[in-house]
Amino acid sequence: MNIKEEILKLKETKKAVILAHNYQIPEIQDLADFVGDSLELSKTSKKIEAPFIVFCGVRFMAETAKILSPQKTVLLPALDAGCPLADTILPDQLLALKAQHPDAWVVSYVNTSAQIKASSDVCCTSSNAVSVVKNVPSKKVIFVPDKNLGWWVSKNVPQKEIIIWQGSCFVHEQFTLEELERARSAMPDAVVMVHPECRKEVVQRADLVLSTAGMLKSARESQKKRFIVGTEEGMLHKLKKENPQKEFYSLGCAKTCVNMKKTTLRELRDSLAKGRYEIHLEEDIIKKASIALERMIQYI
Ligand code: SF4
C-alpha cells in the first residue's frame, strides 16, 4: 500500500475529514476533502458532521476550527506550523492598545492566536475585512495584526478612524513594485491580481486585490487568458487545476510560506494514525473567541 492509500484508509477508519488551505503542497490539496481559504474552511469545519478534523494549514486555522466546533477533535499534522504574522501581536499588547482607545471596536484578522480572538470584538478574513469594518457600530476601529490589509481596509472605509497594528506577512511582503512592472511589460495582456497582504505600492498598481477565494472566482469568471498572481505559490496549483485552459504565473519568482509546507504526506499519515497533534484550548478562550468569529458572519 502506498502512502496515499494508507491515508485514505485511515481517513475512512477514523471517520475523519481532511481540510487543506489553498497554500498547501499539491499532494495534500489533491487528497483533501475540502480545499479553501480561511473563511471557507472555517465555515466548512462547522458544517461537517465527522468527529475528527485534520487541518492541513497553520496553527491559527486549526484553532479556529476548534473554536467553531469545540466538540470535535481537531488535529494539526505539523506541530510547528505556525504563522509569523499571527505572532506579531501578543495578548498584553492588544490589551494595552484597547486601554488607549476604549471607544474602538477591535477587528482582528483570522490570522491571530485564539487568545487575540478572545480579546477582539469581531474577526475578519481578507475576503470580508472591508465589509466587517464598514459594518461595526463604532466610528473608531483597532485593526490587527496586518498593516497592509489594514491600509487596504482604511482606503476602502475612509469614514472610519482605523488604528492599525504594524505586523506583516513575510511572504507577501516579498512582492515588489519592480517585479510587478517587469511582469506587466513582459505580459501586457495579463491580469495582475494580488492579495491585500502585499505591500501598499504593489496593491496600488494591481488590477485586482483579492483573497485567495476571490482569485479563484475571478479566474473562473474572467474572459482573460493570462494571470499574474501575487500570493503564496501554493495557490497556483488550484488556479491551474480549475482552469486548465488559462495561464497563471507567479508575480516575480515564486514566494513560499515554509510553515504552509511543513505538512507533508508523511505528517498527514502519522497525524491520522497517531491522533496527533490535537488542538486544546481553554473553555473560556473558546467561549470569548467564538463570539468574535460568529459576529464576523453577521457583519458580512
Ligand atoms: S503565508 Fe503569511 S499569513 Fe499565511 S501562514 Fe504564511 S506567514 Fe502566515
Image (tube, rainbow, N blue to C red):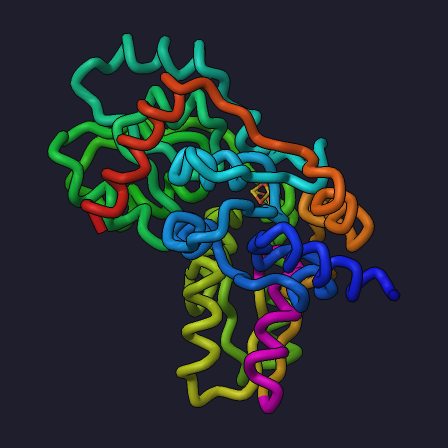
Could you say which is closer to the camera, residue 192 or residue 272? 272
Residue in the picture at 41% in, 65% down? 214
Asked which quadrant contains residue 187, the reply is bottom right
* Quadrant of residue 122 within the rendered picture: top left
Residue 288: image location, x then y, percent: 31, 23
**91 w.r.t. 251: above or below:** above
Question: What residue appears at the point 37 percent right and 41 percent down from the top-left corner?
Answer: 151
Task: Report the magenta residues as a range.
Answer: 230-245
x, y percentage for residue 199? Answer: 52, 47
Is residue 126 visible in the rendered image? The answer is no
Q: Quadrant of the N terminus?
A: bottom right
243 falls in the magenta region: yes
Q: Which image quarter: residue 94?
A: top left
69 or 207, nearer to the observer? 69
- Farthest residue toward the right? 1
Say if 140 sits above or below 127 in the image: above
- The single residue placed furthest to the front in the displayed view is 13
Which one is in front, 167 or 84?
84
